[in-house]
Structure formats: structure tokens, C-alpha cells
Amino acid sequence: MAGGWAMAPILICSAIALAIVLERCWTLRRSSVLPPGLSQEVREWARSDQLDPEHLEKLSTGSPLGELLAAALAVRNRPRELIKERIEDTGRHVVHRMERYLNTLGTIALIGPLLGLFGTVIGLIRMFMQVMVGGMADPTKMAGGIGEALICTAAGLTVAIPAYVLHRYFRSKVAGYCVDMEKQATLLLDDLTFSAPASAPRPRRAPAAPGASV
């Protein structure tokens, strides 16, 4: 209340940032994104040919890594380049979902100090207008007004600094997950392509005997 009405958008931004941080902390848990042992289990399914639509559907909805591996298994009988292309397409969608709300968090980190500065400027303008009307009979009131105006700047920085740090933290966390998922997808891709039975060579036709009719 000491910061005036300009504190309202700062408080709204702080509530949104807190909600995003809590949601991302829960969603981006390592056990949720990269379930331990899932890649090895999926490769065993592929080797033993235990792949049916029910397995793939459950795998796709279980985790981001599972969705990526399920996309590769869905086209496992295609050439390597097509499987790799499907993995890349699915990976872009998976990364987009893992980065959900992070742009909003970055925006809050950017505008937090600006909102604080805006509140400070509004407070100083109001204080100087009061000085113009009533004069500087009491300097302590002017000092108190400056202190109240700076509350907005302090509040904006208090919101922006943690938001910026957590934004960078979640970005780096998603980047690390992408590297791990790429490794697991590559292992599955190698199993699907290198272990596939090579096609039998076509028999060569025997040369026609001299003088034989064509």
C-alpha cells in the first residue's frame, strides 16, 4: 500500500511468476521427463517384437521421452532417414511443451524493473506536485515521499531477479533433457536399423550361351 497503485501490476506479475515456477518444477522433474530404465525397456520390446498399438499408446502418453521413442517405433519398418526425420519432428513438439510458460516468465523478469521504475516516477511526480502546492515546509515529508516512491523499484527488482534466474535455470534444464533424449533416441534408432535383417541379394542371371536365341 505504501507503494501506491503502481504496486498492483507488480504483485500480479509476482503471483503469475510463482505459479509458473511451481508448475514447471513439478512438470520438469527428471523422473517425469526421463523415467529411469525406460529406454532399455523399449529397446528390449523392439528386439523381442513386443510392439502393439496398446504398448505404443501407453508409451507415448507416459513421458516426453516415451513420446519420442514411440514416434520412432511407429515407423520402425521405414528407412533410417525417415525414422530420423520423424524423431526430429516429434522432438520439436516435445521441446515446445517442455518450454511452456518460460517465455512468460522471461517477460516478467524483463518488465519487473520497468514496472518498479514506473511506480517510482509516478510517486515522485505526485510528491513534487504536492511540494509545488504546499511548499517545502516539512522536509521530512519529502524524504518520506521519496522512500515510498522507491518501494516500487525495490518490489520490481525483488520480482525480476528470481524470475530471471529461474528462467535461465529452466532453459538450461530443458536443454540438458534434450541432449539426454537425443542420446536415447539414437540408441533406439541404431537398434531398429542396424539390427534389421539385410535384404537377400538378387541372384545374377547366367550369361546366355553363344548362339542362343534371346
Image: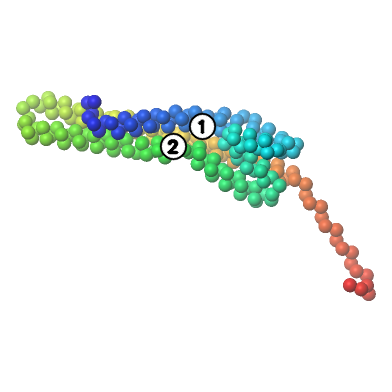
Q: Quadrant of residue 192?
A: top right
Q: Quadrant of residue 19?
A: top left
Cα distance, mark 2 to mark 1?
A: 12 Å
Q: Quadrant of residue 168?
A: top left
- What amino acid is at disc 1? Leu
Is label 2 in a helix, a strand or a loop?
loop
**Residue appearing at x 57%, y 29% in the figure:** 31
Is label 1 in a helix, a strand or a loop?
loop
Mark 1 crowd level (few <14, some 14–19, many ≥20, 10 Å Cα): some
Do the numbered discs 2 and 1 sit on residues whose CB atoms are within 8 Å? no
**Residue appearing at x 93%, y 70% in the figure:** 209
**Residue appearing at x 71%, y 35% in the figure:** 45
**Residue appearing at x 39%, y 32% in the figure:** 17
In this rendering, the answer to whether 73 lies above or below 144 is below
Q: Is residue 203 visible?
A: yes
Which quadrant is home to the C terminus? Answer: bottom right
The residue lying toward the viewer, choosing from 161 and 101, is: 101
In this rendering, the answer to whether 3 lies above or below 53 is above
Give the total number of marks visible in the rendering: 2
Left or right: 10, with 174 as reference point: left
Give the x, y percent position of residue 185: 63, 41
Residue 28's disc is 1
Give the x, y percent position of residue 107: 37, 39
Left or right: 202, with 63 as reference point: right
Give the x, y percent position of residue 137: 5, 27
